[in-house]
Image (tube, helix red, strand yellow):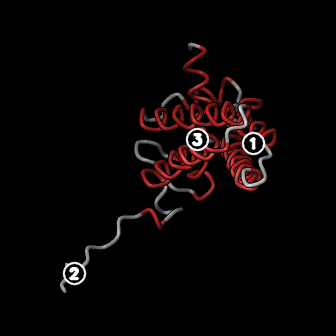
């Protein structure tokens, strides 16, 4: 397994965390088939990501660039998983759909860009990169976790508006 693939696969777990937490099954992946060890790591990962996003949101208005950069780097590095993902768990994840891998890669790229913007102390760039990071989260939730995030479901058709 190449280093790049291992990194993407390990990071892809971030995107599966929503399913592990609520038991939702993403397309082509049976979350109930994941081991208990992997589910526990996924739950811990999602809690850390949520805390990181909250740190960035709270730090941006005060210009706490160091806190933003630290959180962004941690998100890029997958807080828990990079440290605890064993070879067996990596193999368990090898069958993830390409869509997960692409969204995961995009998430980590956004986190890295957010860290760079924070280090440059550029409020506009930080705001932009943070919004792009959140767009990646929303895209995953809309595509793969509608049961957990029902607001992303398509609204029912409405009658045309007439004046």
Q: Nearer the viewer, residue 141 or 121?
A: 121
Identify the secondary structure beneath mark 2. loop
**Separation of marks 1 and 3 at Cα, in angstroms:** 11 Å
71 sits left or right of 129 in the view: right
- State the image coordinates of residue 109 (x, y, percent, origin top left): 57, 31
**Separation of marks 2 and 1 at Cα, in angstroms:** 44 Å
- State the image coordinates of residue 9 (x, y, percent, origin top left): 57, 28
For marks 1 and 3, the one nearer the N-term is 1
Which residue is tagged 1? 68
Residue placed furthest toward the top: 2
Asked if labels 3 and 1 touch by Cβ distance under 8 angstroms, the answer is no
Q: Nearer the viewer, residue 126 or 74?
A: 126
Q: Residue at x 78, y 37 (%)?
A: 70
| Quarter occupied by the C terminus | bottom left
Neighbour tally class for label 1: few under 14, some 14-19, many 20 plus, Cα within 10 Å: many
154 sits left or right of 130 in the view: left
- State the image coordinates of residue 115 (x, y, percent, origin top left): 69, 34
For marks 2 and 1, the one nearer the N-term is 1
* Marking on residue 22: none
Neighbour tally class for label 3: few under 14, some 14-19, many 20 plus, Cα within 10 Å: many
Which residue is tagged 3? 129
């Amino acid at each position: 397994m190449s280093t790049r693939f291992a990194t993407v696969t390990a990071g892809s777990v971030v995107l599966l965390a929503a399913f592990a937490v609520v038991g939702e099954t993403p397309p082509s992946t049976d979350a109930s088939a994941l081991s208990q060890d992997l589910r526990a790591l996924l739950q811990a990962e999602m809690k850390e990501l949520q805390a990181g996003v909250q740190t960035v949101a709270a730090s941006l208005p005060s210009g706490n660039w160091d806190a933003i950069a630290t959180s962004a780097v941690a998100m890029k590095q997958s807080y828990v998983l990079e440290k605890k993902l064993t070879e067996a768990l990596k193999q368990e994840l090898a069958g993830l759909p390409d869509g997960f891998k692409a969204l995961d890669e995009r998430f980590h790229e956004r986190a890295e860009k957010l860290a760079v913007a924070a280090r440059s102390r550029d409020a506009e760039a930080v705001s932009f990169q943070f919004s792009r990071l959140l767009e990646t989260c929303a895209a995953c939730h809309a595509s793969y976790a509608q049961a957990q995030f029902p607001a992303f479901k398509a609204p029912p058709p409405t009658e045309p508006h007439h004046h």
